[in-house]
Amino acid sequence: MSRRSLSLNKLVLAMAVSALPMLGHAQDLYATINAKSKAIEARMIDWRRDIHQHPELGNQEVRTSALVAKHLRALGYEVREKVATTGLVAVLKGGKPGPVVALRADMDALPVAEEVDVPFASKARATWDGREVPVMHACGHDGHTAILMATAEVLASMKDQLPGTVKLVFQPAEEKLPKGEIGGAKRMLEEGAFDGPKPDAVFGLHLAAGMPVGMIGYKPGAITAGSDAFRMEVKGSQTHGGMPWAGIDPIVLGSQIVLGLQTIPSRQIDVTKGPSVLTVGTFNAGQRYNIVPDKAEMSGTLRTSSEETRQFIMKRAAQTAEDIAHSGGGSAHVHWEPNGYPATVNDEALLGRMLPSLSRVSGAKPQLVPMGTGGEDFSFFAQQAPGLFVMIGATTPGQDMKKAAPNHSPRFNPDEASLLIGLRTMLTLTLDYMNGAAAAAPAAQKS
């Protein structure tokens, strides 16, 4: 067991002991959460299927946003629309004074052609980066939106008893936008999503393939990686393929750069401080077999677990490419897209406080998980308020988890039983935080 896990276990145990006098109240609270969640489950699934059948790409979530806004206004929320183009922020003030809790769901789909044989499969198409593409909810955002819609209704039904304020954030464009456009969480914050009132804590979740339904994955510190994209141009001098000495070969230089980049995470980063990945995903050069072209173009991605590592690798990648190109008489320029995401970092004090709450989610078992290398722009919200982001298992138990179609696959098909776990998780975290005490019965997991 790691020292971090030991300290979390001690913290959870101490909080559980302090919470024992409130056990009777807690039991009533969780019974209410379970009953109200079960009562709305069928409608939540219907919302998810409707959104799934009508997916919309980033900053195009017009139908989805209108559906959510109509629902929230009917429940009595104060709703602000068109935040970061198609996002919305809604506020519900409880009947008692208390903290402000923000809850976030992302609404956008992906340019993916669905291959799941269900009656509500997507047949939608849209324009993305100047091209017509198929559209599918291949990452679970339809489920996230439905979960938060259901959470909103349950909390509204308890408004008079709520000791605090709920702020709901329905976010567009989590999956990034083409051509380096800025959207999603970063733009929502720039447009005041966390203003008036500012949250004291923010909670989010993600449906995850390869984890069984009933499992809630948590991790102190970075739970998802920082995600950045780069484009690179290597310039040489065109010549005949039979006389390479008469020019400068950007393909050879580019190949050396690809290998050189791999020494940054493997030889220049202290691996004990967290993982990092630097991948070249495209390499394009030339038009004819016997001509050395004048340039080569590459693109790729960087995944990091800390801002320090992120900034170091970005700087070193540019230096490495330029130095290798210069050594062969050419030049190289690395452009980092401005829409990168930092790592999503869970606030350790908040996680320690809420671990007992996760253990009381009916039908669920919290479990410590490793950092994922996928990106998640919940990270920007967690930089503005203490944040907790958890993974909700979405694969049917009994299946081979390694063979489950992953998020972003055209065959991604989450078990809808995961929605109920997600709903109960959101409600339990919100109400326990507002009531100022985590649930009894700790269940800190060993690493």
Image: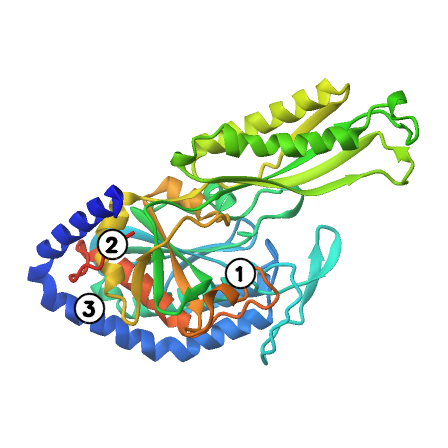
On the question of residue 94 being in view, the answer is: no
In x, y percent, where is residue 136? 61, 65
Instruction: Quote the CA–CA distance across marks 3 and 1.
Output: 33 Å
Give the residue type at disc 1: Asn
Reading the image, the residue beneath label 3 is: 29
| Residue 275 relative to residue 3: left or right | right
Binning the other alpha carbons within 10 Å of mark 3 as few (below 14), some (14 to 19) or many (20 upward) gives some
* Lower sequence index among marks 3 and 1: 3
* 72 vs 290, nearest the viewer: 290
Find residue 347 and report its horizontal and vertical position in percent: 31, 44
Give the side of residue 114 with respect to residue 43, left or right.
right
* Cβ atoms at labels 3 and 1 below 8 Å apart: no
Q: Earlier in the sequence, mark 3 or mark 2?
A: 3
Q: Which residue is the site of mark 2?
A: 354
Q: Nearer the viewer, residue 439 or 284?
A: 284
Residue under label 1, please give it. 407
Tell me the SS state at disc 3. helix
Q: Is residue 171 left or right of residue 16?
A: right
Callout 2 amino acid: Met
